[in-house]
Every structure is written in C-alpha cells, then in structure tokens.
Amino acid sequence: MNLYIKSLKNGINIGKNLFIDTIRKWSNIPKIRCIRYTTTWECNSKCDSCFIWKINSKKDELMTLEELDRFTSSELLKDVRRIIISGGEPFLLEDLPERLQILHENCPKAYFGMTANGLTPDRILRLVKRIFELSPDICIRNLGLSLNGPPEIHNRSRGIENAFEKTMKTYELIKEYLPVRFSFTFLPYNIDQYKWIKSFAKEKRTDAYICWTVISNRFFDRNFLGDLTIKEFYQKLRPMLNKEVKRIREKYLFNSFIEERHLDCTAFRDFFHVDPYGNIYPCNFNLSEDRILGNVKETDFVEIWTRKKRTEIINDIKSGKCLYPNGVCGDSDINYSVSHTGMHCILLWYLSSNGKI
Ligand code: SF4
C-alpha cells in the first residue's frame, strides 16, 4: 500500500484512539495503554551527551523471544495503544523484527515509535524490510533518526567519523518504508543548529523534533555541559525555543522543564517500562533498584502488576520527587503523560503566558 495512504489510515486510527484515551484518562479509568521497551543497552555510537555505550549490555541476559511472548500475551496488555522501542541501539539486535512481530501480534491495537542512530545503513535497511515481511500491517508511526547538526557538529557529538554520512544514507534507504524524522539533541555547541536541522529536514521532505531526554543526566553525573549547570543550560535554550517551537503542547512541556513545574506523570498507572532483562520499572529515567516492581522472566505479569509496591511507587511519583533531580526526567515518558492528562493546564498556561516559553 502506498506510504501516504497507509499513513493517513494510521493517522485516523491514532486520532480516534487518542480521543478515547483522553476521555478515559480524564474519567480516571486505569488501563495500560503504553509500554516502553528498551530492547538493549548496547550502542555503537560514542555520544558525548549520553554514556549508554559505556554500560555493560549483558547480552546473554536479554529476554528471549519466548519470554517476551509469554509476558506480552498477558490479558492486561490487550488494549495497549502505543509501544516505544528504544535502547541503546535497537537495530543492533538481529532478532528485532521477530520481537516486533511478537509485540504486534500480542498487542494488535498498538502503534510503534522507534529510535535509531542510523550508523549501520545496510543493516538497518535489511532489518526494516524484515520487519514488514514478518508484520505487513504493523503501524510504525515514527522512526526517529538522531541528527545533531551539519556534518562536523553531528560527527563530533556522536564521536564517530562520517556519522552524518551514514545517518543520511540510512535515511535515504529506509524513507520509502516508514515515516522517518530527525531527532535533535541540544548540546552546548549546537544550540543554533536547531534552525538548520528544521530547514534541512524540510529540504529532505520530513520533519525534526527535539529529543530532550539525553540532556538530562540520565545515567551518569557527567559534565558534558562544562561549567554550565543544567538549569543555566536550559535558560540558554529559551530564546531559540521561543522562535522555533510552534506546537502548544511542546511549548508547555519545555517551559515546564525550564521552570521545573510539577507535571502529572502517569507512570505505573497507564504505562510502564520494561528493560532488556525483563525488569518492570515505572519509566525509563529513574532506574534505581527500588523502582523495580518485578521481573517478567521469573513472574507472571499480572502478579507483578497487582503488587502493593506499585501503589507505593505511584504515590512517590505523584509527589514529583523524581522529576527534576538531574535536570529533568526525560521528555518521552512525561510527554506521554502530559499528552492526555493536562490539556486544561496547557490551555490555561498558554492564555496566561501568551505562549512564551
Ligand atoms: S516523573 Fe519522570 S522520572 Fe518520575 S516516573 Fe514520571 S517519567 Fe519517570
């Protein structure tokens, strides 16, 4: 089917589900709607803003296909609407297509969002083709390819020679198969490049978006900002964001990060994160041991989900303590929460601030 018609059909379905989910959330009916699945912590990039590549990826402990199938066959996951596939670099997993096939079959109403660094063009093309061979009607709504600026800046940020060239080759190879957008991370030396990325994306007939996740000190208290504190860095972004960000919800979100506004996070209420080894966390940003609810390799998911500890963690999240200790928890998971629960807050904020971040 033509990519345009396929995208249109998917868009209508997603719009319908978003509407239903918003009503459902406002009425406070709990149901799991979103899963974030970190497929692997392994990464072949050497980014100066993210040190995931230094983590021991413990490949022999990954959830097997059988374990993934058993876990996602749970009745509790039948109504999942959205699955975020992240990493590390998901395309380093040779059986990624099989993993997506299992998720697609077990959660048939879900659309997928994915991220990739684009550093292995031929491999990514081969795996993308295989995904659609195994699951012809899977809805991958977005594949975010990391791009942090023109060649010199992008290569520097990735710590890889010719990273830009490789990512662009990937883009050209896979753009016919699924919607690909550029995912941009702010760094001290590329703040002015977001404008460039936007117009470059337009030339390439796609779009670019900000990936705030990596700006937070997610895994390590690293000093990629030099003498700047995270707060000072966020302040520096404000003029650029005010010029370039047009969508109201994004404006609200970025303003919230800068102002450290307490956001209504719905982690462990309607979404959760599962790591490569089957550990169930509320989200992908605070991965301390005490936030593990259980492990689906060892225990049935229903039993894990009904544990009293989940309510305790929800209460802790509601207090907002986990949001800003290292800058911000991360845009992707909190964005999911805000997208359904906060429309009235967003409109009020917009009217009172005149939409200024
Ligand atoms: S507020 Fe942020 S860190 Fe806390 S649970 Fe939600 S997404 Fe995770």
Image: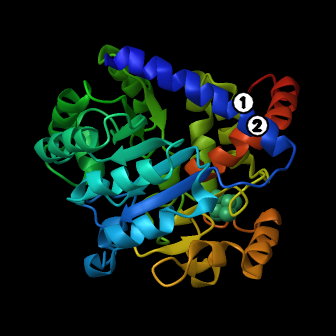
- Determine contact: label 2, label 1, CB under 8 Å: yes
Q: Relative to the observer, which residue lies in front, 3 or 273?
A: 3
Mark 2 residue element: helix
Mark carried by residue 132: none
- Residue 22, which numbered label? 2
Where is residue 42 drawn, in percent x and y?
A: 29, 66
- Name the amino acid, label 2: Thr
Q: How crowded is mark 1: few (under 14 residues within 10 Å), some or many (20 or more)?
A: few
In the picture, the quarter occupied by the C terminus is top right
In the drawing, does residue 345 fall left or right of residue 44?
A: right
Rendered residue at 56%/77% (across/down): 300
| Circle 1: element type | helix
- Mark 2 surroundings within 10 Å by alpha-carbon count, few (fewer than 14), some (14 through 19), many (20 or more): some
Give x and y (percent) for residue 30: 77, 55
Q: Quadrant of the rendered structure where residue 352 is?
A: top right
Of residues 62 and 209, the one nearer the viewer is 62
State the residue at coordinates (72%, 54%).
31
296 displayed left or right of 62: right
Residue lying at 49% horizontally and 85% vertically, measured from the top left? 298
Relative to residue 242, is residue 205 depicted above or below?
A: above
* Residue ID at (78%, 52%): 264
- Quarter for ligand 1? bottom right
Q: Measured from the top left, where is residue 322 in percent x and y?
A: 70, 67
Tell me the residue that label 1 is attached to. Answer: 19
Nearer to the camera, 152 or 339:
339
Q: What distance separates the C-alpha of mark 2 from that of mark 1?
A: 5 Å
The answer to whether mark 1 is within 8 Å of ligand 1 is no
Asked if one can make out residue 275 in the rendered structure from this viewpoint, the answer is no
Q: Image quadrant for the N terminus?
A: top left
Quadrant in which residue 140 is drawn: top left
Amino acid type of the residue tagged 1 in the rendering = Phe
Q: Is mark 2 within 8 Å of ligand 1?
A: no
